[in-house]
Amino acid sequence: MSTATADGPLDDVPTEELRQTSVRETVRSGTDPDEAIAFYRDVYASPDLAFVLDGRGFGFRYRATGDGRVSLRTSSVSVRRVGVLAPQRQYLLAWSVEGNVTIDEDLDEAVSLQPGVPVMLPAGRPFHVTAAPGTVHLVHFDADFLEAVAVVGSDAAPMPLAFPVTVSTERLAPLQAVLREIARPMLDVSVVHGDRAVLDLRLAEAALEAFRPVPEARGASVPVGTLARAKAFMYAHFDRSLAATDIAVAAEVSVRTLQEAFQRQEGSTPMGYLRDLRLEKARLGLQLADARETSVAAVAQSCGFRHMGRFSGAYFSTYGEYPGDTLRGRRRLIAVADRPERRVPTGG
């Protein structure tokens, strides 16, 4: 495995620089099926993913390049693979070079990928994949980032999104044009900070325009497991006033059991986890907001904060700056993307 990063060791970087974008590239390849299956199971949270070996030799190659918001990935495997994928808090755009990839083949709404045609893989639930030997390209969107971009310019809270898996060729054409234009600079680890923000936003906006999601119905899916149920409930209702008892009821356990589960697996309390979730949502909202059109209070309230003083103090303790600084900051993502000289970086 080789890993490259556009930034130096984090221990030597000033605090100011840590707020800027770190871009990383990971490449894995080999001929050992056991190594490959362990790697892919970890990447896609799929303990039952399997390769169908045919005795004709095996090889795989995986490349991922991006920051914490958006990454481009390519996966090539020389044998058939089957399994249930359950990527956590990500939206996955995918297209196959050869086709012959089927999503949820046992369901009435099964989808077969056509060569070069992007689909939005199911989000918020596990899904079954059957793939013939070949190459698949993917775009991984961090869920918090894409949900925040979806509500830019409105007072709505950034909620989980329900995407159609497929859309018409006409809707896909602008997205495919953007992908062709920005693929090279997005794969360049030297394109960072403001230039990287431009690329992330352009691709996020293009995907949202093509697939036109709607907010997911609250409680539409019921995950398995205490923590999974609790977290899903918090992501769907973080903008509301919640108590530990509300979360425990959604998780179908007692408050004590819920607290023990969070302490054991997250090193936190349910309310501490909820506060951190709200802070993350608020930070993205402030980075994407236009200071001429919104306020710190409006963003904070949309993320479930009711006491501005407490919010400001918690925000400063977490991020080292006050919410107003983020809203007015020069690195505010929407300001970078909207600058008059906006262009796609050419890369190296």
Image (cartoon, rainbow, N blue to C red):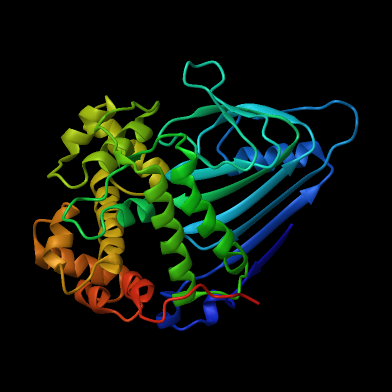
Specify the quadrant that holds the N terminus. bottom right
Q: Nearer the viewer, residue 8 or 214?
A: 214
What residue sits 24% from the left and 73% below the top? 327
From the viewer's perspective, is 34 left or right of 91? right
- Compared to residue 320, the image places residue 201 above or below, namely above
Q: Is residue 88 above or below residue 84?
A: below
Q: Nearer the viewer, residue 129 or 283?
A: 129
Residue 267 left/right relative to 135: left
Residue sitting nearer the eye, 46 or 199? 199
**Quarter of the image holding residue 164?**
top left
Question: Looking at the figure, which quarter contains the C terminus?
Answer: bottom right
Q: What is the x, y in percent for residue 88?
A: 46, 41
The vertical placement of 203 against 56, above or below, is: below
Q: Residue at x 51, y 45 (%)?
A: 93
Name the residue rendered at 91%, 31% in the picture. 56
- Spot occupied by residue 54 in the image (x, y as percentages of width and height): 85, 25
**Whether residue 91 can be seen here:** no
